[in-house]
Image (cartoon, grey):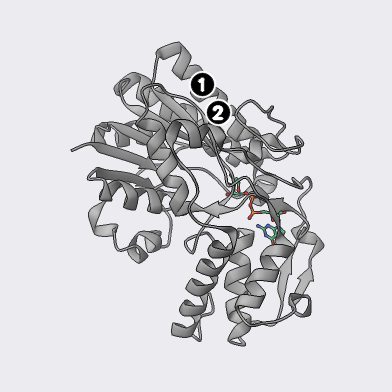
Amino acid sequence: MKNALIFGLTGQDGTYLADFLLKKGYNVFGTFRRTSHRCFERLEEMEIFHKVTDIKADLSDYGSVQAAIKQSEPDEIYNLGAQSFVGASFQQPVLTSDITGLGVLRVLEAIRENVPDAKFYQASSSEMYGNYPGIKNEESPFRPRSPYGAAKVFGHHMTNHYKEAYNIFACCGILFNHESPLRGLEFVTRKITYALSKIKFNTLDKLHLGNINAKRDWGFAGDYVEAMWLMLQQKEPDNYVIATGKSHSIKEFLDIASEYAGLGDWHEFVEIDESLMRPTDIEDLVGDASKARKNLNWEPKTSFKELVKKMMDHDIEYHKQHPSSQY
Ligand SMILES: C[C@H]1O[C@H](OP(=O)(O)OP(=O)(O)OC[C@H]2O[C@@H](n3cnc4c(=O)[nH]c(N)nc43)[C@H](O)[C@@H]2O)[C@@H](O)[C@@H](O)C1=O
C-alpha cells in the first residue's frame, strides 16, 4: 500500500484528492493548520475524515513540514497548501509570498533531505500568466498580476529547479480555475451560488460583486484531482496545463445560476461594489490542455452548465435544511 501526503488536506482540492487516493487504496496523510475553529468540515461532508491521518503543520514552519514528511514516509507528496485567495494577496503580500511561494521551497528542501525518491506534485496556477493574451499552454510566458501569481511563479521555478538539480521526480500542474460545492465562500462562483440560494429563501436581499466582466476557464475540482495523480504515474516528470479550453464571464455564470434557481433577472439583486475590485485583475484566462489529453489521457468530464447546477443544487439543499443559517 502506498503512502500519500497532502499539504493542504482540508481545502477543496485536498478533500477531493484525499477521496480519490483513498479509492485508489492509498494510505492518506494530510496537513492542516492550527486555527481557533474546526477546519475539517469538508472532509466530514465527504465522509472521509475518519479514513485519513491529519498532521498539524504549517508551510511557513520548516520544522513542521519536515516532521510531517518523516511521520508519513510518503511515496507521493502533493502540495496544495497556499494562501490561495488572490484578492487577499493584495492586502497580505508578505504572508502570501511566505506560504504560497517559500512554502514550496520548504517542502522541496524537506524532500531533498529526507525522501529524495518521493514523487512531488506542485499546484501551479493559471494566475501565473496574468494578462498574456490568447489561449495558454505550458510554453506561454508568465506575467503575474498579483502577489499570489508572483508567489506561484516562484514555486513553479523552484520545483523545476529541484527536478533538474537534484533529480527529484517533480511535476507542476498549471491548473485553471476549478470549483465545486466545497469551494470557499470567498471565491466568486461559490459566493454567487451561496448568495443566490439565500436570496431564494428570502434570507438575503442583495449580492455585492466586483469586476463581473472578468472571464475564467472554470472546471470541476473533482475532475482536476485525477490529473494531479496521473502526472505522478508517468515515466518522466513533466508540467501540464489542466483546463477546459473555454472561458465564461461572471455575468454568464450569473445568467445560468439565476435562471436555474428560478430567480429571474439577476440585475434586480446584484450590486457592483468598487471596494471588491482588485488593484490589478486578469480579464480572460483560457487554457489549452492538449498535452494532458495526449500524454495523460485526461479530459474534463463536467461541463460549465453542469458545474453551475451542481453548485446551485448543493447550496439550495443546504439552505432548505438550515433556513435560519446566519453563515
Ligand atoms: C486559478 C486561480 O483561481 C482562483 O483565483 P481567481 O481567478 O482570482 O478566483 P476568484 O473566484 O476569487 O475570482 C475570479 C474573478 O472574479 C472576479 N470577481 C468579481 N467579483 C468578485 C467577488 O465578489 N469576489 C471574488 N472572489 N471575485 C470576484 C475577480 O476579480 C476575478 O476576476 C483561485 O483558486 C486561485 O488560488 C487560483 O490559483
Q: Nearer the viewer, residue 306 or 280?
A: 306
Q: Is mark 1 within 8 Å of ligand 1?
A: no
Whether residue 99 sits left or right of residue 168 in the image: it is: right
Residue 122 against residue 29 in the figure, above or below: above
Whether residue 15 sits left or right of residue 190 in the image: it is: left
What residue does disc 1 label? 160
Residue 257 against residue 30 in the figure, above or below: below
Identify which residue is drawn at 50% across, 81% down: 319
Whether residue 22 sits left or right of residue 140 in the image: it is: left
Q: Quadrant of residue 118?
A: top left
Identify which residue is drawn at 24% across, 58% down: 50
Q: How far across and down, in percent of the image, does residue 270 sit?
A: 75, 73
Identify which residue is drawn at 59% across, 64% down: 305
Q: How far across and down, in percent of the image, does residue 55 sit?
A: 31, 45
The reply to whether discs 1 and 2 touch (Cβ–Cβ < 8 Å) is yes
Residue 195 against residue 138 in the figure, above or below: below
Residue lying farthest to the left in this orientation: 1
Q: In this rendering, does residue 272 appear at all?
A: yes
What residue does disc 2 label? 156
Q: Which mark is residue 220?
A: none
